[in-house]
Image (cartoon, grey):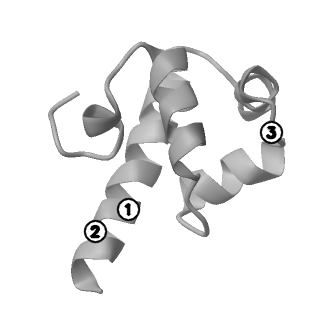
Amino acid sequence: MFIIVIMVNKFSNIIKALRTDRDVNQTALAKALGTTQRKVSYWENGATEPDLDTLIQIADYFDISVDVLIGRKEY
């Protein structure tokens, strides 16, 4: 369970950093992914995680690998 919490925290920090570094607001990211701003907020706060298909969409949007997105490789 401890490892899962660390991975979620890494993901939430990484997605927020990617979004803010590229001057994308939550609403714009949500629209590009076909989801809601509330879901993006939940991801960034660690309340929920996206499914695998959405992880791939996020990685494609930011032009990074899923490994980077979930903190397995350096950004």
Label 3 neighbourhood size at 10 Å, few (<14), some (14-19), many (20+)? some
Q: Which residue is mark 2?
A: 6
| Quarter occupied by residue 31 | top right
Q: Earlier in the sequence, mark 3 or mark 2?
A: 2
Marks 2 and 1 close (CB-CB < 8 Å): yes
Image x and y of residue 13, in percent: 41, 48
Image x and y of residue 36, in percent: 84, 42
Q: Is residue 45 above or below residue 24?
A: below
Q: Which residue is mark 1?
A: 9
- The kind of residue on which mark 2 rests is Ile
Q: Would residue 44 appear left or right of 67 to someone viewing this image?
A: right
Q: Residue at x 57, y 28 (%)?
A: 57
Residue at the bottom extreme, as displayed: 1
- Tell which of 56 and 19 is nearer to you: 56
Label 1 neighbourhood size at 10 Å, few (<14), some (14-19), many (20+)? some
Quadrant showing the N terminus = bottom left
- Tell which of 69 and 44 is nearer to you: 69
Q: Is residue 12 above or below residue 15?
A: below
Q: Would residue 64 appear left or right of 58 to someone viewing this image?
A: left
Q: Residue at x 15, y 32 (%)?
A: 74
Residue at the left extreme, as displayed: 73
Distance from disc 2 to disc 1, alpha carbons, whole Å, reads 5 Å
Q: Nearer the viewer, mark 3 or mark 2?
A: 3
- The kind of residue on which mark 3 rests is Thr
Distance from disc 3 to disc 1, alpha carbons, whole Å, reads 21 Å
- The kind of residue on which mark 1 rests is Asn
- Tell which of 27 and 32 is nearer to you: 32
Q: Which residue is mark 3?
A: 35
